[in-house]
Image: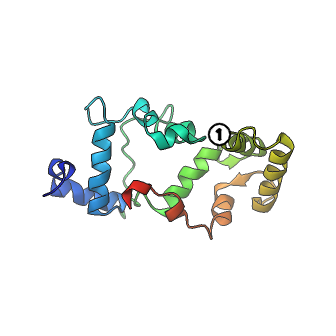
Amino acid sequence: MGSRASTLLRDEELEEIKKETGFSHSQITRLYSRFTSLDKGENGTLRREDFQRIPELAINPLGDRIINAFFPEGEDQDNEKSKDVNGPEPLNSRSNKLHFAFRLYDLDKDEKISRDELLQVLRMMVGVNISDEQLGSIADRTIQEADQDGDSAISFTEFVKVLEKVDVEQKMSIRFLH
């Protein structure tokens, strides 16, 4: 028999979600089941506190940055994206995952990752396990290797170029979907 999640989603809704996200029927069903278990208010939405209860995010040094990416300040909270004439790109596309990752580093939202921003994120990730001098060296080397236009920062285009051989689709996937 089908799961509780499949009985709560109509076939039309499943097809629409598949089209928008690129997820399979079984992945959507599992996500919906996880969603309903996280939706403590049972109001069909997840609050910041619901995300904070996810153990994998609670122990992740970037957990707060990841959660904040879902709740951007000053942006409309209804989550309706502008509709592309050719249809929206799936939410789990390589491009969307790269934009999401870039925003985790672009702390001041100026479309560039500066040395200071890179240092702050590196500090969040490694804590006190690496000296400031070593972190500075890593940040400098990263900027030097990625910066193609000489502005001492990493643009989204440069970020994408650095990650062109990385399997972003696999590395940035939700493990419980597989």
User: 80 or 63: which is nearer to us?
Assistant: 63
Query: Would residue 158 be visible to someone looking at this image?
Result: yes
The quadrant of the image that shows the N terminus is bottom left
Q: What is the image's colouring? A: rainbow
Number of dots carrying numbers: 1
Horizontal relation, residue 57 to residue 89: left or right = right
The image shows residue 161 at horizontal and vertical percentages of 66, 65
Name the amino acid type tagged 1: Leu
Tell me what residue is drawn at x 34 percent, y 61 percent.
23
Q: Is residue 98 left or right of residue 114?
A: left
Q: Secondary structure at mark 1?
A: loop
Q: Position of residue 172 (x, y in %)?
A: 51, 57
Question: Of all residues shown, which one is farthest toward the left?
Answer: 1
- Compare residues 19 and 172 and report the one nearer the observer: 172
- Residue 125 picture location, percent across and down: 66, 44
Rate crowding at label 1 as few (under 14), some (14 to 19) or many (20 or more) other CA atoms within 10 Å.
some
* Residue plotted at (55% across, 63% down): 168
Residue lying furthest right in this view? 133
Above or below residue 28? Residue 62 is above
Q: Is residue 36 left or right of residue 92?
A: left
Horizontal and vertical percent position of residue 93:
46, 62
Q: Quadrant of the C terminus?
A: bottom left
The residue lying at 84 percent from left, 47 percent from top is 134
Q: Would you place residue 62 above or below residue 175 in this image?
A: above
Question: Furthest residue to the bottom?
Answer: 165
Residue 145: quarter of image: bottom right
Task: Please tell me whether residue 81 is drawn above or below residue 177 in the rendered image.
Answer: above
Where, by quadrant of the figure, is residue 130 drawn? top right
Residue that numbered label 1 is attached to: 107
* Identity of the residue drawn at 23% across and 57% down: 14
